[in-house]
Amino acid sequence: MCELLGMSANVPTDICFSFAGLMQRGGGTGPHKDGWGIAFYEGKGVRCFHDPNPSVDSRIANLVKEHPIKSHVVVSHIRQANVGKVTLENTHPFQRELWGYTWTFAHNGQLDKALFNKQLSYYQPVGTTDSEFAFCWMLGEIRKQFPKRPDNLSELSAFIQTLAEELRELGVFNMLLSESTALFAFCGSKLSWITRCAPFGEASLTDCDMTVDFMKETTPDDIVTVIATVPLTENENWNIINPGQLVTFVKGLPT
């Protein structure tokens, strides 16, 4: 299956360290060689990179790893194709507009063909993956339930969890979803997270020989949470999200 990577931070932060570990799994230390993508929110704007080639050999991925793009919210994905050919249009994360915000979605897992019996209301897929179809259905349901952006984030989170649980009944459904301020992380089978804050220490990647001393890279007020399908570091204690649980992160903290 695919793997997910997300970040929520209270200050503009780069994800170079974590992405360096993830990209190795895209055809190097892992089998996820069927494309990759990453989205960086800058205010309401989104800077995106997609490539249907393996991330471990991608010059674009190497650029992302080396270039410290600062963001409050990041959504990334490496793909092991199940449904849909290996093409650019089938490469996550996918995006659509709602309430004047760009929503970004990435999915890990495979859903039953019964998914395609669901009625799509406002959004149509460009590619042929079950993931993009599920995203179009989910965002359409959110739009029907909330024609205007709700003031209550908890109410929105609860509704998103209901939709995610409905999709989980059709197979494996792990998800990252954001509209620029909140990062919704739903665990259907496997997802974990770690929050780094003062006092900061060293972290070492599992998939390549890289160690960072975050004390030298941060200020005492920084709060950064990284979400991943499988923990990316070997010397930190990651939190495991329970199957069926949605965790919503805002400015680096779970709400």
Image (tube, helix red, strand yellow):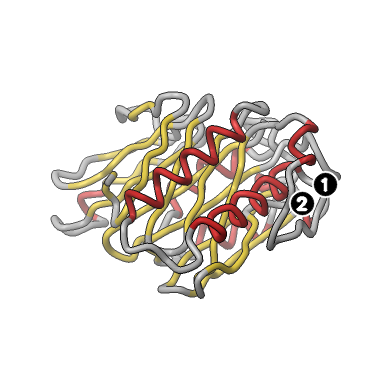
Q: How many labels does the image show?
A: 2
- Residue kind at label 2, given as amino acid type: Asn
**Residue drawn at (54%, 62%) of the image:** 103
Secondary element at tag 1: loop
As drawn, 152 above or below 26: below
Mark 1 and mark 2 in contact? Answer it, CB < 8 Å: yes
| Mark 2 secondary-structure assignment | helix
Task: Residue 86: give its label.
Answer: 1
Q: In the rendered view of the protein, which quadrant contains the N terminus?
A: top right
At which x and y percent is residue 61?
62, 56
Q: Position of residue 78 (x, y in %)?
A: 64, 43
Horizontal arrangement in the rendering, residue 228 relative to residue 36 (left or right):
left
For badge 1, the amino acid type reads Val
| Residue sitting nearer the eye, 203 or 126 | 126
Direction from residue 169 to residue 18 in the image, left or right? left
Which residue sits at x=46%, y=66%? Answer: 41
The percent position of residue 134, horizontal first and vertical second, equals 67, 45
Which residue occupies the foreground of this view, 14 or 74? Answer: 74
Q: In this view, does 134 lie above or below 1?
A: below
Q: Nearer the viewer, residue 197 or 149?
A: 149
Q: Mark 2 points at which residue?
A: 90
- Checking the image for residue 141, the label placed there is none
Residue at the spot x=53%, y=24% of the render?
189
